[in-house]
Image (cartoon, coloured by chain):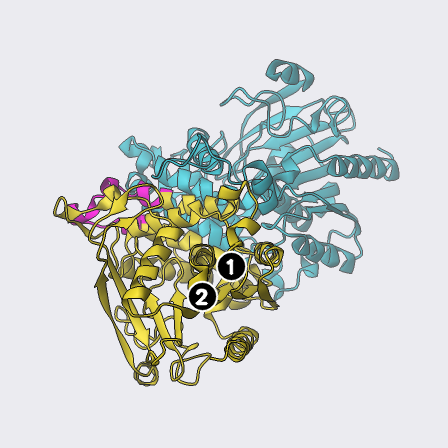
Chain colours: A yellow, B cyan
Amino acid sequence: MVEVLAKAAGETGGGVTRLAHPLRLESGGSLDAVEVAYQTYGRLNADRSNAILICHALTLDQHVSGVYPVSGKPGWWTRLVGPGRVLDTDRWFVICSNVIGGCMGSTGPSSVDPRTGRPYGLSFPVITIADMVHAQALLVEALGVTRLFAVVGGSMGGMQVLEWARSYPERLVSAICLASAARHSAQNIAFHEVGRQAIMADPDWRGGDYQIAGVRPEKGLAVARMAAHITYLSEPALQRKFGRELQRDGLSWGFDADFQVESYLRHQGASFVDRFDANAYLYITRAMDYFDLAAPHGGQLAPAFKRASEVRFCVLSFTSDWLYPTAESRHVVRALNAVGARVSFVEVESDKGHDAFLLDEPVMNAALTGFLAATAEATNL
Amino acid sequence: MVEVLAKAAGETGGGVTRLAHPLRLESGGSLDAVEVAYQTYGRLNADRSNAILICHALTLDQHVSGVYPVSGKPGWWTRLVGPGRVLDTDRWFVICSNVIGGCMGSTGPSSVDPRTGRPYGLSFPVITIADMVHAQALLVEALGVTRLFAVVGGSMGGMQVLEWARSYPERLVSAICLASAARHSAQNIAFHEVGRQAIMADPDWRGGDYQIAGVRPEKGLAVARMAAHITYLSEPALQRKFGRELQRDGLSWGFDADFQVESYLRHQGASFVDRFDANAYLYITRAMDYFDLAAPHGGQLAPAFKRASEVRFCVLSFTSDWLYPTAESRHVVRALNAVGARVSFVEVESDKGHDAFLLDEPVMNAALTGFLAATAEATNL
């Protein structure tokens, strides 16, 4: 199946771009020698009008389609991205880049600091969603695209979409924000803080300098992932999938993984540490916690979108998503309405929780297909 | 205030009872030299008809009223237990014992194993809610009480209440189950497993033998508590209490506790390790995960209560409790209805989440007061 999907992904490209100048950061500092790793799918047309940028979520990366290099499995959105699919790569030139602060090729805390010749670790500057988007904008420019037909993303990807609409509305025809929010809530921050504390409690974290020490805080990172993973699923989905089903006949009367849900979570933790960097987890969760588009406007969200009234928006939430519930999407929609932007809002009935945006959700697929077609028609693309 | 409350708690007693025989456990094994630590408030009347047993939640203990010895603060349910209060100690003889497996005086994994002269650690047998209740029943007998006017508890205490109704219905006039469930859901188990993994990931846990090594897995236990604590509060309560309020002016652009909710959670973790034992946390969470009253009856709950039709029940849930949501209480109520038991069911409108049963909830207070009065009147007590 992997091979078939890889072929089906059509013409793909990608690489690593080094930004020409230091990246100025929201914190006030700057970052030298920034590299942005990216993948492309499909072909940019002659008038450069068919580019769609996908923004990835916390632990995902640029490998949206084709084969994911670490595991050999299909890319995380292969279901949506490919010839004839929702994001049809016969028609669209799809770009996705690894966020800065990440660990899949873009500059992040595990990169070598050119000033010291050693991995940054905690000397890496705290970056924000706006910094991620700024780096993406420079990449998109470097690829010869001046205006994106759409920017699309779910979860943290949706935050980047909203940030694009705030920072670069003139470069967007449309923006699609899935299962996301314009700010991190107290509960969102709380779950992230648990994960960070789990990582930092691991003695192998070594104050962030584990690479130099040749170790990895695997146990702490696994616990962080386990806690986070629960928030990605709805209670009914967990109950339907696992209930109280046991791994073996009968209870162990001990602390083995008796229940299938325990075994599943342990597996989620264990497999995550093979593909993700602990410091990147700290930095990216921090960027999400700091995200609050309304903050510079005294808590009012609409002013953040005041330049985005010409962008066409699609905002989509899932009924059982308790991480970024529909109320957060409605808040975004009201702000967009307030500035007179065109907004399609869809709340998809699903019991799969936050991760529904990664799964086969026919209503979501239909909404995205319809939105893209209508936008293309309205803008003569 | 502590002193006033302590005095107001009225006549108090307590101590530690050693069970006369080994305690037979649900696992098939048995536990020698079991001690049960308890507190009493008020006075047992001449015909021994005014005893109320309170069952405590996961991390609480027998100090329901008066002064809590570890912190010097008021006992955890001082608001409800005392002269003239909901559980009026001028009228009722209130008993509460530390669960076995716990760490406040009853035999648990930190107790010395009489066979080895060393702390049990992980050689302590896995115990269940039924085992806890069995030990309580022996304590109640030892105190000269053959029939309880009521058994009351919230959260894990509510599980014990339901277990009392299953195992010893003839010893109960009434049973009050607050914010609880007849089984642990997949999500409940998942959150507990995160906590256990956090503890076991701490190298100072030493495979459970940390006492012998003279260390404590404080970081792991703190992370476990932080994760659990989020589940005790509702999202709106966290948002109202903390929102995105900062600890100081401006962001730290680092990994300090920038947000008040982070600082609050860190404090919850840090203060918890001062009063709780990591292995006890493992054992008690395991007991809760194993709890499923319907399991021996092919998934049918009603048969578990078939001997309890004469017990008067009060079942109470809170609208914003997502740990043990109202649906779980309704499930209990339906099973009790099916066996013809009298049930008062109250869903209290509250946005405070699971911990509401520990807080000042006037509707809960009124429901309990009314239920106790009606039961006393109906049974001529």
Residue A36, percent from left and from top: 26, 61
* Residue under numbered circle 1: A308
Above or below, comparing residue A177 to residue B105 in the picture: below
- Residue at 13% over, 44% down: A116
Above or below, comparing residue B312 to residue A157 in the picture: above
Q: Which mark is residue B216?
A: none
Which residue type carries mark 2?
Answer: Leu
- Tell me if I can see residue B33 in this picture: no
Please state which of residues B5 and A106 is positioned toward the viewer in this rendering. A106
Residue B341 located within the stretch drawn in magenta: no
- Residue at 42% over, 34% down: B250
Q: Identify the mark nearer the N-term, 1 or 2.
A: 2
Residue A191, percent from left and from top: 46, 47
* Residue under numbered circle 2: A172
Give the residues in magenta: A197-220
Q: Secondary structure at mark 1?
A: loop
**Measured Cα–Cα span from mark 1 to mark 2:** 9 Å
